[in-house]
Amino acid sequence: MTTTYTVDDPVKGRIEYSDRKRYLWMSSLFMPLFPMLGIALYYLFDSQWMLVLPLVFSYCVIPVLDYVIGSDTDNPPEEIVPQLDEDRYYRILTWLTVPMHFIVLIGIAWFVGTQDLTLWSVLALAITAGSYSGLGINTAHELGHKKPAFERLLAKVVLAVPAYGHFCIEHNRGHHKDVATPEDPASSRMGESIYKFVLREIPGAFRRGWDVEKERLSRQGRSVWSVHNDILQSYAISAVLQGGLIIAFGWIMVPFLAIHNFWAWYQLTSANYIEHYGLLRAREASGRYERCQPYHSWNANYIFSNIVLFHLERHSDHHANPTRRYQSLRNFEGLPELPNGYYGMYVLAYIPWLWYKVMDKRLLELPHINGDLGKVNIDPDRREEILRRYGKGQGEALAV
């Protein structure tokens, strides 16, 4: 049954809109459960090779589905957006996703702790669990930007699964302020590989999140080591959850959870890497950076990966309008466009020379850059090399 939203506009007359993806969004709810399919197939075929199928689906099948199914550039009419945002169906999907992440981690941990598995199978399961717990950070991303306290609480809770409790604080009050600038550890630079970026992004985000929360508590006259610290609240849930798994299933949980946590964090790193690669906000005469615009983020409209990621790939509108709900995010003409959905771009990023070959040219051909390296966020360590390759006489201008 399709829901149709209507409004009578004094200028445009009667406006009607139906979200063609309304029930496809339920894919975001069931996607975190997909790793359990590998376990079910293991029991069915008695083969540990079945355990890697969720990873194959994520990093091989989804990019193909994005290519085959294609993109959707449809936008809801702005006059309809208030009704769309108030439809609780969309909110409930994000709320119900939260317990799914706990179920999957506990279920996979039980399987690892009770089955006679090879070390390679344990490694595959840890990476699989981490990959899908990384989706939990995406769920927290959607919830943590919203004003209702209940949704912010759920964001804090789901971040406990990958033990990344500082994310919402760092992301909302740090990344969104500094995005597409050299000061942002979560914005990748032209010529910077993802393997170099991860060494800057993960510790940089942690430090910034802690500093921002410390400053907030200081203004309230409270110690950073208090129960009012939102980061510590989430970490406490992590300690109970993961400590309980170690007690329940033994020593194997220590390396399993360490790999799980890192790979979940690395999924966020992968997303951050592709979302703002090389993009740079200009400095104004005041010395401040210009307001973040849609062209300061890489965008993607691929249907399949967007419906399982709560429209995360419409990142351009998200950064320009952070509180806008996922079902209302818009596409714009002339945006920086990724050549595949996020999962396909992750794989590309993991092969740096291929990433540079595809993305550097695409970056420099953007209309607002048009080959001007002065408008690009460049890795300082590769600046001279990039200038020699793409500069074409820009050396003196960039030096000034």
Image (cartoon, grey):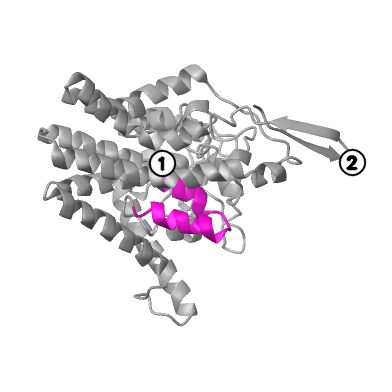
Q: Is residue 130 left or right of residue 181?
A: left
What element does badge 1 sit on? helix
Q: Crowding near pointer 1: few (<14 within 10 Å), some, many (20+)?
A: some
* Residue 89 quadrant: top right
Residue at x 41% of width, y 41% of height: 271
Residue at x 45% of width, y 54% of height: 155
Q: Where does label 1 land, which residue?
A: 271
**What percent of the width, then of the height, locates residue 373?**
49, 42
Q: Give yes or no for residue 265 being in the magenta stretch.
A: no
Residue at x 49% of width, y 35% of height: 363
Distance between the alpha carbons at the discs numbered 2 and 1: 42 Å
Q: Where does label 2 land, which residue?
A: 10
**What percent of the width, then of the height, locates residue 342?**
43, 33
Q: Is residue 71 left or right of residue 36?
A: right
Pick out the residue farthest to the bottom.
Answer: 221
* Residue 234 quadrant: bottom left
Residue at x 35% of width, y 63% of height: 207
Q: Is residue 338 left or right of residue 81?
A: left
Segment colored magenta: 137-160
**What percent of the width, then of the height, locates residue 278?**
45, 42
As drawn, 54 above or below 385: above
Closest to the observer, 199 or 244: 244
Q: Crowding near pointer 2: few (<14 within 10 Å), some, many (20+)?
A: few
In the rendered structure, which amino acid carries the disc numbered 1? Ala
Closest to the observer, 169 or 396: 169
**What percent of the width, then of the height, locates residue 145?**
53, 54
In the rendered structure, which amino acid carries the disc numbered 2? Pro
Task: Give the main secondary structure of the magenta stretch.
Answer: helix
